[in-house]
Image (cartoon, grey):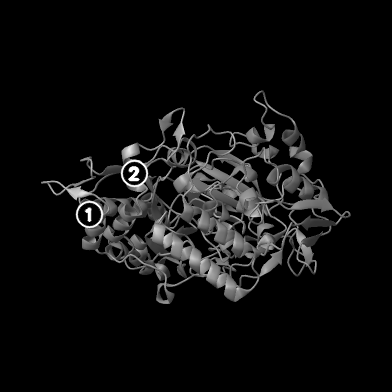
């Protein structure tokens, strides 16, 4: 997994799960009057995001928003409508009888956005020198690790059009993982070889958000044309993109995409209602308002059912120290690492009220890290443990765990310390801020004081993945059909094992880092699931993993909203889905006048 899909309502890499900056990311537009008359004639899609991109380097990205769904493609992709694998840069692929070798045949005539040929050499470079290079901290490597020994595949060139991957043992999800962005060797090769003064590859500082757009060489349907910090990101159609329609006309049809950086969803709503936006993600709090205006506003609200995204709160279970200082206060760490404490918190959160009030009933309860669309999802009716609102049960668990109540009915631990902790989330999303406020109130009813603080997105993510300076967080991850997409969440060494994060490459070491037995067990099940090809056994394996996540609660799951977007009727070719969003097939979408 990674720290989104439909977040930006376009095609996402099928090998990765991403931290979601917001539960309902708003697709908005700038006022056309601010554009030149010439630009108004250009077929364009104007949307918005809540915060600036963090990097333009696809290998180093683990967050959304990011530009890579538009700017890069991998060997294969997964159709979010039917779940089938389809060729992208690879035209076809073959698997050896023993399932340890996969040979891809590349399409003919592929080119980079600078007109240079895109070849098998680029594929070999991308995997060998970047994704499989231990000196480069990329989440992609986590989902490529195979078996209990966590070995990596090897890659070699067979001829000018064929490339072969070898895996040490059969690895069922491997094909899904080849959706990772292929990067240009002719531009990036030297940066993976040469080192900076600290001995780190120059690649780590390559293609930051301060890189001039013309220096970014891509292979996707769009290239970056302009980026104005805190204002907008502009994409222009890549003239060397490989796709053509049945009449031989180059795709995509839409010439330009504009992302306005708008920090307020209220502002986005006003823009959409005034007719200046092309599309907006429909948050539950204004569904009814927009539904009544569909005909008048010449748009349609698409509902893809339960989102593929999760939402949860998580406690920092890390028992380690940095430079002799505990990452989490020892008193709090003792609370957080008590499973009865976490279960009590789960029972104390009134998810039905959250669903009714914050989500206006437009969602469902979340109980699993695996998306409901996945064939491996274990529903509650088949045995998955759930935590129905029961504050009395919560108090009972706390008392059994050694906590007590003082004369003011506030919760204290056995040593008399008042139970109080901080809960962080990202600012700018009304839905998530409303969820946090309710959690604060709900836990207050069982005597727990919560200091709820929304932070700017980049500050929030820095605490979660770098400084590790946090008590509890409210955040989300995207999902998909394949559970192994979450390997970097459930592997203790993974880049998104956020509830007990191991230091990543380039970060300060942690002394005394511990991994619980249940953490190891979940990881072992994910490894086992990646090796298994029998569907019935797979369901048993992932079913057990979901039971463990619900028993030990590294994540306390909350509410899963419906995936909804309002889109102007002039956009033709929309195939909306919870997994892919509105613009996953951007190359096929046309604009009618």
Whole-Å distance between the Cαs marked 2 and 1? 15 Å
In this view, the residue in front, 298 or 563, is 563
Q: Earlier in the sequence, mark 2 or mark 1?
A: 2
396 relative to 57 in the view: left or right: left
For label 2, the residue is 334
Please say whether residue 228 is visible from this viewpoint: yes
Q: Is residue 379 above or below residue 498?
A: below
The structure residue drawn at horizontal position 49% and vertical position 34%, both measured from the top left corner, is: 511
> For this view, does 168 lie left or right of residue 6?
right
Residue visible at 23% across and 59% down in the picture: 396
Q: Residues within 10 Å of mark 1 (few under 14, many from 20)?
A: some
**Along the viewing direction, whichever of 422 and 160 lies nearer the viewer:** 422
Tell me where residue 571 appears, x and y as whole percent.
Answer: 56, 65
Left or right: 337 with respect to 213?
left
The tag on residue 399 is 1
In the orientation shown, which residue stands out farthest toward the left?
407
């Amino acid at each position: 997994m990674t720290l989104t899909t439909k977040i930006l309502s376009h095609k996402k890499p099928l090998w990765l799960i991403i931290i979601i900056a917001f539960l309902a990311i708003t697709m908005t537009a700038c006022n056309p009057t601010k554009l030149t008359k010439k630009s108004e004639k250009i077929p364009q899609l104007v949307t918005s995001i809540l915060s600036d991109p963090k990097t333009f380097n696809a290998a180093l990205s683990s967050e959304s928003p990011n530009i890579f769904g538009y700017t890069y493609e991998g060997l294969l992709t997964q159709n979010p409508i039917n779940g089938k694998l389809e060729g992208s840069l690879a035209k076809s692929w073959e698997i050896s009888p023993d399932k340890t070798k996969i040979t891809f045949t590349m399409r003919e005539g592929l080119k980079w956005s600078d007109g240079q040929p895109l070849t098998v050499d680029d594929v070999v470079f991308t995997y060998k020198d970047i994704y499989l290079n231990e000196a480069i901290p990329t989440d992609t490597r986590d989902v490529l690790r195979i078996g209990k020994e966590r070995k990596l595949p090897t890659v070699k060139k067979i001829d000018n059009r064929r490339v072969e991957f070898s895996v040490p043992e059969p690895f069922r999800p491997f094909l899904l993982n080849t959706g990772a962005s292929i990067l240009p060797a002719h531009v990036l090769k030297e940066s993976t070889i040469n080192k900076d003064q600290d001995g780190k590859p120059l690649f780590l500082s390559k293609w930051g958000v301060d890189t001039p757009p013309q220096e970014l060489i891509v292979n996707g349907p769009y290239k970056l044309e302009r980026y104005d910090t805190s204002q907008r990101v502009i994409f222009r159609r890549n003239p060397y993109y490989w796709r053509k329609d049945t009449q031989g006309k180059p795709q995509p049809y839409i010439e330009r995409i504009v992302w306005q950086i708008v920090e307020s969803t209220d502002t986005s709503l006003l823009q959409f209602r005034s007719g200046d936006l092309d599309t907006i993600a429909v948050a539950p709090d204004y569904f009814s308002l927009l539904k009544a205006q569909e005909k008048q506003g010449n748009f349609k609200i698409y509902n893809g059912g339960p989102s593929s995204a999760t939402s949860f709160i998580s406690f920092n279970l890390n028992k380690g120290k940095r430079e002799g200082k505990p990452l989490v206060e020892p008193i709090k760490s003792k609370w957080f690492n008590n499973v009865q404490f976490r279960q009590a918190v789960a029972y104390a959160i009134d998810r039905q009220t959250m669903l009714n009030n914050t989500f206006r009933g437009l969602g469902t309860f979340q109980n699993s890290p695996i998306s409901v669309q996945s064939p491996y999802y274990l529903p509650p009716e088949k045995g998955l443990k759930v935590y129905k609102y029961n504050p009395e049960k919560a108090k009972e668990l706390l008392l059994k765990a050694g906590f007590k109540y003082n004369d003011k009915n506030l919760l204290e631990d056995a040593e008399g310390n008042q139970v109080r902790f901080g809960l962080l989330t990202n600012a700018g999303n009304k839905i998530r801020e409303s969820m946090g406020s309710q959690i604060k109130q709900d836990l207050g009813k069982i005597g727990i004081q919560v200091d709820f603080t929304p932070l700017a997105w980049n500050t929030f993510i820095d605490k979660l993945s770098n400084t590790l300076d946090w008590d509890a967080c409210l955040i989300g991850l995207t999902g998909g059909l394949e559970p192994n997409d979450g390997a970097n969440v459930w592997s203790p060494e993974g880049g998104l094992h956020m509830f007990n994060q191991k230091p990543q490459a380039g970060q300060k070491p942690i002394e005394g880092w511990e991994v619980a037995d249940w953490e190891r067990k979940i990881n072992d099940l994910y490894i086992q699931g990646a090796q298994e090809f029998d569907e019935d056994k797979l369901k048993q394996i992932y079913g057990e993993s979901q039971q463990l996540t619900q028993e030990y609660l590294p994540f306390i799951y909350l509410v899963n909203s419906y995936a909804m977007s309002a889109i102007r009727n002039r956009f033709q070719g929309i195939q909306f889905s919870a997994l892919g969003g509105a613009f996953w097939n951007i190359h096929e979408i046309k604009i009618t006048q």
